[in-house]
Amino acid sequence: MSKLRILVLTSSTGGGHDARAAAFAEWCFQLYRHDVDVRIEQMLEKSSVIYRAGVNFYNGIQRGAPWLHKIFYTVVEGLSLLNSRRVTFGSAYYRAVLADYRPHLIFSVHDCLNRGYFQRARQLLGAERVRCATYCGEFSGGWGYSRNWIEPSVDRYFARTATARDYAVKKGIPADRARVRGYLMRPRAQLEVFAPAERGAFRVKRLGLRPDLFTVFLATGGNGANNHFELLPALVRHADRCQAVVICGQNHEVYNELIHWRANHPEFNCYIEGNSEIVHLLMQASDVIVTRGGTTTCAKALHFRCPIIFNAFGGVMPQEQLTWKFFRNGAGSDIIENAAGFAALIDRWMAEPGSYARTRAQFLALRYEEDPTLLIDELVGLANEVAQVPLTRLPFPPANGNGAKPPV
């Protein structure tokens, strides 16, 4: 086995949890190579038929009936009682993973994989032979901030914002174990950055778009929930001043329909992609992004200076409410509930460019710069409190500068 072993617990409820798990694994290899082994487990789906059904149901209502999630969320909160000191469902699979892998650190990036899971690991492995940490991606506290995030025995608790960190402390996380670490993106997102002056060239050479038009990014999560066809007509009305970047996630049917739609609207400039691997570049090329309140997407948008229009079609899910509240209170970000609301917003920005400029300035005021390696080093160091092995830390950015520019 590798010198240092870290078990990451995640689940595919939406795409953000898995994205953070993958980002962490890539960072560990980027910085520590073979000194650190990361094993990612989609623990809910793989450990229990009941949990697997719950994950599928969650993703289904996110695509088709977000309003229903308020009821689902209330039910899921009951896990805080079932798993207060033990793992109720899927315990046999979790125990087998622990016995086989014997991790030095349990790192949870999902709300339902903290309470009970940390206690079970200490019981099986020994309290002095394993450390436990949580990364909570929520932007603020209140209704929607699951009580399942709050496990007071955690060795380290990472929050995305100071607002969310203070709420976690209020709910029981020891203040001396709580940290604010806002960004957890893949290393390539830190390397593949271009200057504003290069944006026009990227639009032309990589996306086949005009360099000078106002560019709206219609985004979606990995499961493909979207309202693209309701939003596009508002942009087509301003085809001489607007263009779009559109991604579809895993929704192949929508991708196929969009390709057909684009062929029948030659007057409108539009870049279409399925499950994109270059979202960080598409954000840099766009003037605004339309998205639901997914924490990973919104964190990237903030980092890459791309203002957000929040998509509230069908209602706002409780976790999305936390994100929307943070950006509403801090930047006055816009939210749309239907196509008419989106059209009115675009009409206003096209008629009064200064209104968009004010929106962007307020949004950028929320940004802060952060060393992306700080979180990784802290987690690896926490694991090494147990393992006590020599580690070789590589520099970042890489000394040879490879990958510093995106392809255009």
Image (cartoon, rainbow, N blue to C red):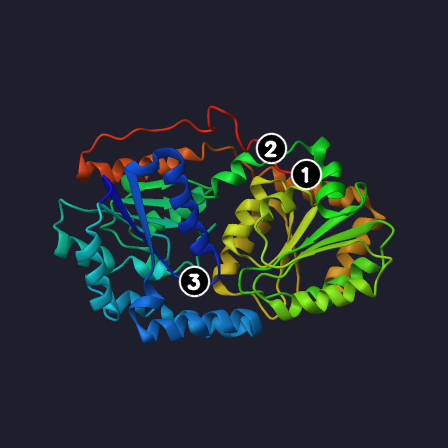
Q: Is residue 21 above or below residue 50?
A: above
Label pair 2/1, CB-CB below 8 angstroms? yes
Viewer can see residue 159: no
The answer to which image quadrant residue 210 occupies is top right
The residue positioned 14% from the left and 52% from the top of the image is 125
**Left-right relation of 360 to 114:** right
Q: Quadrant of the C terminus?
A: top right
Residue 372 place in picture, x, y as percent:
45, 35
Residue 41 place in picture, x, y as percent:
33, 58
Specify the amino acid type for callout 1.
Val
Q: CA distance from mark 3 to mark 1?
A: 32 Å
The dot on residue 12 is 3
Residue found farthest to the top: 399
**Left-right relation of 192 to 2:** right
Judge depth for marks 3 and 2 and give the one in front: 2
Specify the amino acid type for callout 2.
Lys
Specify the amino acid type for callout 3.
Ser
Is residue 240 or residue 248 the one in the foreground?
248
Is residue 177 or residue 125 the one in the foreground?
125
Look at mark 2 in the image and give the residue it sits on.
Answer: 405
Mark 3 or mark 1, earlier in chain: 3
The residue positioned 41% from the left and 34% from the top of the image is 373
Q: CA distance from mark 2 to mark 1?
A: 9 Å
Look at mark 1 in the image and give the residue it sits on.
Answer: 408
Judge depth for marks 3 and 1 and give the one in front: 1
The answer to which image quadrant residue 195 occupies is top right
